[in-house]
Amino acid sequence: MLARYVDPRVDALYGEFDVEIVPKGRYPKEGQTRAVCSIRRLIDNHGAEHARLVLCVLAEGRGNHALIEESSLMAVSDLLLACPDLVEQGMAAVPEVFDAIPLGAYIAIVNELRGRVHQGHALAGILYVHLRRLRESSLTAKETIRSRMAKADASEAEKGRQGFTKRQRRREDIIALGKRMLAVKAS
Protein backbone atom coordinates (compact mmCIF):
# COMPACT_ATOMS: atom_id res chain seq x y z
CA MET A 1 0.00 0.00 0.00
CA LEU A 2 0.98 3.62 -0.44
CA ALA A 3 -0.06 4.57 3.10
CA ARG A 4 2.08 7.71 3.38
CA TYR A 5 0.29 9.36 0.42
CA VAL A 6 -3.22 8.10 1.17
CA ASP A 7 -5.88 9.31 3.59
CA PRO A 8 -6.08 6.62 6.30
CA ARG A 9 -9.88 6.36 5.81
CA VAL A 10 -9.36 5.57 2.13
CA ASP A 11 -6.59 3.09 2.89
CA ALA A 12 -8.78 1.34 5.48
CA LEU A 13 -11.80 1.20 3.16
CA TYR A 14 -9.84 -0.22 0.24
CA GLY A 15 -8.15 -2.66 2.64
CA GLU A 16 -11.56 -3.83 3.82
CA PHE A 17 -12.32 -5.01 0.27
CA ASP A 18 -8.78 -6.25 -0.52
CA VAL A 19 -8.28 -3.58 -3.18
CA GLU A 20 -4.67 -2.54 -3.69
CA ILE A 21 -3.85 1.09 -4.39
CA VAL A 22 -1.33 1.47 -7.21
CA PRO A 23 0.66 4.58 -8.24
CA LYS A 24 -0.76 6.93 -10.87
CA GLY A 25 1.79 5.85 -13.47
CA ARG A 26 0.81 2.18 -13.30
CA TYR A 27 -2.23 0.67 -15.03
CA PRO A 28 -4.37 -1.12 -12.43
CA LYS A 29 -5.10 -4.83 -12.75
CA GLU A 30 -8.05 -6.68 -11.25
CA GLY A 31 -8.31 -5.85 -7.55
CA GLN A 32 -6.23 -2.68 -7.96
CA THR A 33 -7.14 0.99 -8.34
CA ARG A 34 -5.67 4.45 -8.75
CA ALA A 35 -8.92 6.16 -7.68
CA VAL A 36 -7.73 7.40 -4.30
CA CYS A 37 -9.11 10.95 -4.53
CA SER A 38 -12.45 9.75 -5.86
CA ILE A 39 -13.21 7.54 -2.87
CA ARG A 40 -11.93 10.26 -0.51
CA ARG A 41 -14.39 12.72 -2.08
CA LEU A 42 -17.19 10.22 -1.57
CA ILE A 43 -16.24 9.84 2.09
CA ASP A 44 -15.99 13.61 2.58
CA ASN A 45 -19.23 14.44 0.75
CA HIS A 46 -21.50 11.51 1.59
CA GLY A 47 -19.93 9.63 4.48
CA ALA A 48 -17.96 6.44 4.91
CA GLU A 49 -21.06 4.19 4.78
CA HIS A 50 -22.07 5.50 1.36
CA ALA A 51 -18.49 5.09 0.08
CA ARG A 52 -18.46 1.55 1.54
CA LEU A 53 -21.68 0.65 -0.34
CA VAL A 54 -20.33 2.07 -3.62
CA LEU A 55 -17.09 0.14 -3.20
CA CYS A 56 -19.03 -2.99 -2.23
CA VAL A 57 -20.92 -2.85 -5.55
CA LEU A 58 -17.67 -2.70 -7.50
CA ALA A 59 -15.35 -4.82 -5.36
CA GLU A 60 -17.76 -7.63 -4.51
CA GLY A 61 -19.95 -7.55 -7.61
CA ARG A 62 -19.50 -10.39 -10.05
CA GLY A 63 -16.97 -9.30 -12.68
CA ASN A 64 -16.76 -5.71 -11.44
CA HIS A 65 -13.54 -6.09 -9.41
CA ALA A 66 -11.45 -4.80 -12.31
CA LEU A 67 -13.64 -1.73 -12.79
CA ILE A 68 -12.81 0.34 -9.71
CA GLU A 69 -12.04 3.69 -11.32
CA GLU A 70 -13.20 7.27 -10.98
CA SER A 71 -16.03 7.12 -13.52
CA SER A 72 -17.52 3.89 -12.16
CA LEU A 73 -17.24 5.05 -8.54
CA MET A 74 -18.96 8.35 -9.33
CA ALA A 75 -21.66 6.77 -11.51
CA VAL A 76 -22.59 4.12 -8.94
CA SER A 77 -22.57 6.78 -6.21
CA ASP A 78 -24.82 9.10 -8.23
CA LEU A 79 -27.27 6.26 -8.91
CA LEU A 80 -27.43 5.20 -5.27
CA LEU A 81 -28.07 8.80 -4.25
CA ALA A 82 -30.68 9.41 -6.97
CA CYS A 83 -32.47 6.08 -6.54
CA PRO A 84 -33.05 5.47 -2.83
CA ASP A 85 -35.36 2.54 -3.69
CA LEU A 86 -32.28 0.54 -4.70
CA VAL A 87 -30.83 0.85 -1.20
CA GLU A 88 -34.19 0.34 0.52
CA GLN A 89 -34.46 -3.12 -1.08
CA GLY A 90 -31.69 -4.13 1.30
CA MET A 91 -27.93 -3.93 1.25
CA ALA A 92 -27.56 -7.48 -0.10
CA ALA A 93 -29.80 -6.68 -3.08
CA VAL A 94 -27.71 -3.72 -4.28
CA PRO A 95 -24.73 -5.72 -5.63
CA GLU A 96 -27.14 -8.22 -7.22
CA VAL A 97 -28.90 -5.41 -9.10
CA PHE A 98 -25.58 -4.16 -10.45
CA ASP A 99 -24.49 -7.71 -11.35
CA ALA A 100 -27.26 -7.70 -13.97
CA ILE A 101 -25.59 -4.78 -15.77
CA PRO A 102 -22.74 -5.19 -18.30
CA LEU A 103 -20.71 -2.50 -16.51
CA GLY A 104 -17.43 -3.19 -18.31
CA ALA A 105 -19.03 -2.86 -21.73
CA TYR A 106 -20.71 0.39 -20.71
CA ILE A 107 -17.44 1.81 -19.38
CA ALA A 108 -15.81 0.99 -22.72
CA ILE A 109 -18.62 2.76 -24.62
CA VAL A 110 -18.45 5.81 -22.36
CA ASN A 111 -14.68 5.91 -22.83
CA GLU A 112 -15.32 6.80 -26.48
CA LEU A 113 -16.67 10.14 -25.20
CA ARG A 114 -13.61 11.03 -23.13
CA GLY A 115 -12.57 14.62 -23.51
CA ARG A 116 -16.09 15.61 -24.61
CA VAL A 117 -18.45 14.43 -21.88
CA HIS A 118 -17.86 13.76 -18.17
CA GLN A 119 -17.52 9.98 -18.15
CA GLY A 120 -19.06 9.53 -14.70
CA HIS A 121 -22.21 11.40 -15.77
CA ALA A 122 -22.49 9.53 -19.06
CA LEU A 123 -22.02 6.19 -17.31
CA ALA A 124 -24.64 7.08 -14.69
CA GLY A 125 -27.09 7.86 -17.50
CA ILE A 126 -26.48 4.55 -19.24
CA LEU A 127 -26.77 2.64 -15.97
CA TYR A 128 -30.02 4.40 -15.11
CA VAL A 129 -31.53 3.55 -18.49
CA HIS A 130 -30.49 -0.10 -18.07
CA LEU A 131 -31.86 -0.32 -14.52
CA ARG A 132 -35.07 1.44 -15.51
CA ARG A 133 -35.64 -1.07 -18.30
CA LEU A 134 -35.13 -3.91 -15.83
CA ARG A 135 -37.75 -2.41 -13.52
CA GLU A 136 -40.02 -0.84 -16.15
CA SER A 137 -40.75 2.08 -13.81
CA SER A 138 -39.02 5.12 -12.35
CA LEU A 139 -36.20 4.39 -9.94
CA THR A 140 -36.37 7.83 -8.40
CA ALA A 141 -39.28 9.19 -6.42
CA LYS A 142 -40.11 11.35 -9.44
CA GLU A 143 -42.25 10.54 -12.45
CA THR A 144 -41.74 12.13 -15.84
CA ILE A 145 -43.60 15.42 -16.31
CA ARG A 146 -46.69 14.86 -18.48
CA SER A 147 -45.78 17.59 -20.99
CA ARG A 148 -42.36 15.97 -21.51
CA MET A 149 -44.00 12.57 -21.88
CA ALA A 150 -46.39 14.02 -24.50
CA LYS A 151 -43.46 15.53 -26.42
CA ALA A 152 -41.59 12.22 -26.27
CA ASP A 153 -44.68 10.36 -27.53
CA ALA A 154 -45.10 12.87 -30.39
CA SER A 155 -41.43 12.47 -31.33
CA GLU A 156 -41.74 8.67 -31.34
CA ALA A 157 -44.95 8.87 -33.42
CA GLU A 158 -43.14 11.00 -36.03
CA LYS A 159 -40.50 8.30 -36.27
CA GLY A 160 -43.18 5.64 -36.71
CA ARG A 161 -42.61 4.07 -33.29
CA GLN A 162 -45.00 3.50 -30.44
CA GLY A 163 -44.78 6.07 -27.64
CA PHE A 164 -43.97 5.25 -24.04
CA THR A 165 -47.49 5.74 -22.70
CA LYS A 166 -48.90 3.36 -25.31
CA ARG A 167 -46.27 0.76 -24.42
CA GLN A 168 -47.11 1.22 -20.75
CA ARG A 169 -50.83 0.83 -21.47
CA ARG A 170 -50.12 -2.28 -23.54
CA ARG A 171 -48.11 -3.74 -20.65
CA GLU A 172 -50.98 -3.04 -18.26
CA ASP A 173 -53.41 -4.72 -20.70
CA ILE A 174 -51.18 -7.80 -20.84
CA ILE A 175 -51.01 -7.97 -17.05
CA ALA A 176 -54.81 -7.63 -16.80
CA LEU A 177 -55.26 -10.39 -19.39
CA GLY A 178 -52.86 -12.61 -17.45
CA LYS A 179 -54.79 -12.03 -14.22
CA ARG A 180 -58.07 -12.91 -15.97
CA MET A 181 -56.51 -16.11 -17.36
CA LEU A 182 -55.28 -17.11 -13.90
CA ALA A 183 -58.74 -16.46 -12.46
CA VAL A 184 -60.35 -18.67 -15.14
CA LYS A 185 -57.80 -21.42 -14.54
CA ALA A 186 -58.36 -21.27 -10.76
CA SER A 187 -62.16 -21.62 -11.14
Image: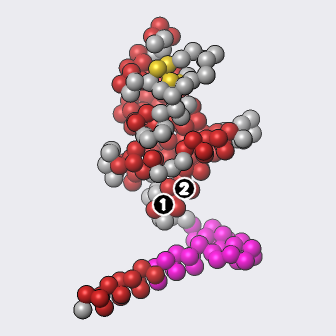
- Overall secondary structure of the magenta section: helix
Amino acid of disc 2: His
Residue 10 is labelled as: none
Say whether residue 103 is left or right of residue 95: right
Q: Nearer the viewer, residue 108 or 70?
A: 108
* Residue placed furthest toward the left: 187
> What residue is drawn where x is 32% and y is 45%?
92
Q: Which residue is mark 2?
A: 130
The picture quadrant where one finds residue 182 is: bottom left
SS class, disc 1: helix
> What residue is drawn where x is 61% and y is 41%?
107
Say whether residue 39 is left or right of residue 187: right
Residue 103 is a magenta residue: no
Depicted 21 relative to depicted 96: above or below: above
Residue 134 is labelled as: 1
Q: Please state the horizontal and vertical placement of residue 48, each as a whole percent of the image.
A: 38, 29
> Mark 2 and mark 1 in contact (Cβ < 8 Å)?
yes
> What residue is drawn where x is 46% and y is 57%?
139
Q: Please state the horizontal and vertical placement of residue 16, each as a whole percent of the image.
A: 36, 25
| Residue range corresponding to the magenta coloring | 145-173
> What residue is drawn where x is 67% and y is 44%?
109
